[in-house]
Amino acid sequence: MTRDWGRIIEIGSNGLLRRAFVPLLLLMAVGVCAQETPAVVPEPQDNGGFFLEATTQYLTFNSRDLNGTMVLGNADQVFYIPKVKPSIGFGIGFGRRMRSGLWSISYLVSGHDAVFQERDSTAVSRLVQLNSRTFLFKTYPTRLFLHFGLTFPWLQVRNNVSDRKGKFSDATYQGVGANLGAGVLAPVSSRMFFSASLLYRFIGYLYASGPVKGIDVTDLFDDVSGPRHRRYLRAPVIALELSLGYEL
């Protein structure tokens, strides 16, 4: 009889242990998790940190003066102002991150289809961009920012200028521009961050070069024999920039 009661007690004890085992593991897991340090991305130091950045952009030119019908030229050569179609581009940059925002310089390139005077062509847009992304709020880790910048662009268009003999060559348009926009920055890891900006970029092309000596852009004409406009070549741009940065 004593043995039977001992066996019953042993079986009951094992059952209680088995039933208590799973909750015990759960409590231990909760305790361990509570003791772990949460994966919080640290804020930049007061003196800032340098970073490298890779950027992709969707670029669309407004057909204000880049309408495919205007011309620019003199007795030696005629530039046929192209209409440049939207495209995707890529770039690299280098900058410094601080508590108030980011400063950077970047180089961006995009290839485009173009058309002028019913001729199909291609164009390559290149620009060097000086950026300031200023945080609006001190919320962390995701931050909204205003995007300001200066742009130094040059646009190369294939077979876009003809000499007095009618031979076509590549044309290059150079100028200056400014950026205005807004975006959001979010951490990916302790060193990596993601940035997205929607920009309005106003570009003025001030100089055109071709097979003969380059000329300043001061007079534009509607077609070869159309009205004359005393102005530079205006080229507003809407751009969506997505960047991935890595702090050094």
Image (spheres, rainbow, N blue to C red):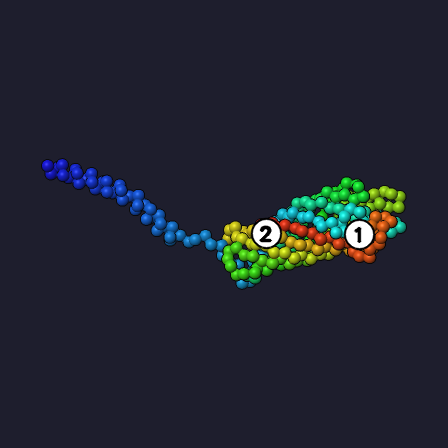
**Label located before the other in sequence (1 or 2):** 2
| Residue in the picture at 58% in, 58% down | 145
Q: Is residue 1 left or right of residue 92?
A: left
Q: Could you tell me residue 167's position as x and y percent?
A: 85, 42
| Residue in the picture at 11% in, 38% down | 2
Q: Could you tell me residue 17's position as x and y percent?
A: 25, 43
- Please, what is the three-letter code of the amino acid marked with disc 1? Ala
Q: Is residue 187 left or right of residue 200?
A: left
Residue 47's label in the rendered image is none
Residue 240 in view in this figure: yes
**On the rendered image, what quadrant is the C terminus found in?**
bottom right
* Residue labelled with disc 2: 196
- Seen from this angle, which residue lies furthest front? 227
Q: Is residue 173 left or right of residue 12?
A: right
Q: Is residue 134 left or right of residue 154?
A: left
| Residue in the picture at 69% in, 52% down | 237
* Residue labelled with disc 1: 208
Disc 2 element: strand
**On the rendered image, what quadrant is the N terminus found in?**
top left
- Please, what is the three-letter code of the amino acid marked with disc 2? Ala
Q: Badge 1: how crowded within 10 Å, few (<14), some, or many (20+)?
A: many
Q: Badge 2: how crowded within 10 Å, few (<14), some, or many (20+)?
A: many
Residue 79 in view in this figure: no
User: Where is residue 86, by image quadrant?
Assistant: top right
